[in-house]
Image (cartoon, rainbow, N blue to C red):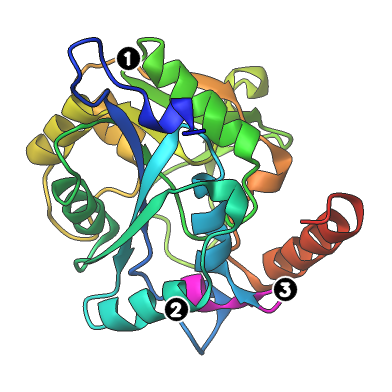
């Protein structure tokens, strides 16, 4: 029987709007050290990018995943994904590979431009968050479907945070100018979910100088459009430093024992 979530049609016979995920994977990830780009580093013997694609593809609401590859690596990424096909649990989710740009902002914009016209909800997910649970992906997509123009999964901040004065030379003691109320702070994760029209406008209006924007929800905030948070998950952490990779290996090993992941 066809999956009703993925293949439902409107009363007039036209395909119903779809949800797609864009995964920018064009960065080098220098904080993990020399070697392959961060998204291609192995985790449990499988590249992190493959884990990230599988994580969002497992969501029943996601029918298309667009991977944005390094400018000189689209063919290699396509080959990699063909060598690691989606599990049966991902249904008939399609995976597309497009060429990225010089910044994350430009890469996401290229992923957006590649989406077919029947996609109205877009999830943007970091390739470096390979272990995001499917429940988190579904919660973000559901909140957008319910009418929120922009949705971000987030967790309460565990540490006290200090705000410092700008312009302090590197290596010098940094003067503290404020201590924000921790109970009002949240650490954001991905996938971030958006109404496609809103996200497209945010990218069209955003400046492109320097490194570009690294947070799509922040770009939407600058439009004056409300952004809401849903609960994140501790396993949706970002693998940025070598210690993060050790933790990710431990989480994956536990999943394999307890869940058959």
When asked about the image quadrant of residue 44, the answer is bottom right
Circles 1 and 3, Cβ within 8 Å, touching? The answer is no
Earlier along the polypeptide chain: callout 2 or callout 3? Answer: 3
- Distance from the alpha carbon under mark 2 to that under mark 1: 38 Å
Q: Which residue is disc 3 drawn over?
A: 44
Q: Which element is circle 1 on?
A: loop
Q: Residue 240: horizontal and vertical position, in percent?
A: 57, 64
Q: Which residue is disc 1 drawn over?
A: 226
Q: Which mark is residue 239?
A: none
Between marks 1 and 3 in the image, the one whose residue lies nearer the viewer: 3
Earlier along the polypeptide chain: callout 2 or callout 1? Answer: 2
Residue extending farthest bottom: 35
Q: Which element is circle 2 on?
A: helix
When asked about the image quadrant of residue 110, the answer is bottom left
Q: Residue 184: horizontal and vertical position, in percent?
A: 59, 18
Residue stretch in magenta = 38-45
- Distance from the alpha carbon under mark 2 to that under mark 3: 16 Å
* 128 up-or-down from 142: above or below: below
Circles 2 and 1, Cβ within 8 Å, touching? The answer is no
Q: Which residue is disc 2 drawn over?
A: 80
The residue shown at (56%, 78%) is 41
* 195 up-or-down from 205: above or below: above
Q: Residue 177: horizontal and vertical position, in percent?
A: 51, 34
The residue shown at (51%, 89%) is 35
**The C terminus - image quarter:** bottom right
Residue 213 appears anywhere in the view: yes
- Distance from the alpha carbon under mark 1 to that under mark 3: 39 Å
Between marks 2 and 3 in the image, the one whose residue lies nearer the viewer: 2
Between marks 2 and 1 in the image, the one whose residue lies nearer the viewer: 2
Few, some or many residues within 10 Å of mark 1 (<14, 14–19, 20+): few
């Amino acid at each position: 029987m066809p999956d009703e979530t993925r293949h439902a049609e409107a009363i007039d016979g036209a395909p119903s709007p779809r949800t797609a995920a864009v995964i920018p994977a064009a960065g080098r990830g220098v904080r993990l050290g020399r070697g392959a780009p961060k998204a291609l580093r192995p985790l449990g013997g499988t590249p992190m990018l493959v884990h990230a694609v599988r994580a969002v593809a497992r969501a029943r609401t996601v029918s298309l995943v667009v991977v944005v590859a390094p400018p000189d690596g689209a063919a290699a990424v396509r080959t990699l994904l063909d060598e690691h096909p989606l599990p049966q649990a991902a249904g008939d989710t399609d995976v597309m590979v497009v060429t990225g740009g010089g910044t994350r902002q430009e890469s996401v914009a290229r992923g957006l431009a590649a989406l077919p016209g029947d996609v109205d909800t877009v999830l943007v997910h970091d390739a470096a968050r390979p272990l995001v649970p499917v429940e988190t992906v579904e919660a973000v997509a559901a909140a957008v479907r319910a009418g929120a123009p922009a949705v971000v999964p987030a967790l309460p901040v565990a540490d006290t945070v200090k705000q410092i004065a700008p312009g302090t030379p590197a290596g010098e003691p940094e003067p503290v100018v404020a201590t924000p109320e921790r109970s009002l702070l949240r650490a954001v994760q991905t996938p971030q979910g958006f109404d496609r029209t809103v996200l497209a406008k945010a990218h069209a209006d955003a400046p492109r100088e320097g490194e570009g924007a690294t947070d799509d929800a922040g770009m939407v905030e600058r439009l004056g459009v409300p952004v809401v948070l849903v609960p994140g998950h501790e396993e949706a952490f970002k693998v940025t430093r070598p210690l993060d990779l050790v933790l990710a290996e431990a989480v994956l090993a536990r999943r394999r024992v307890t869940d058959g992941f």
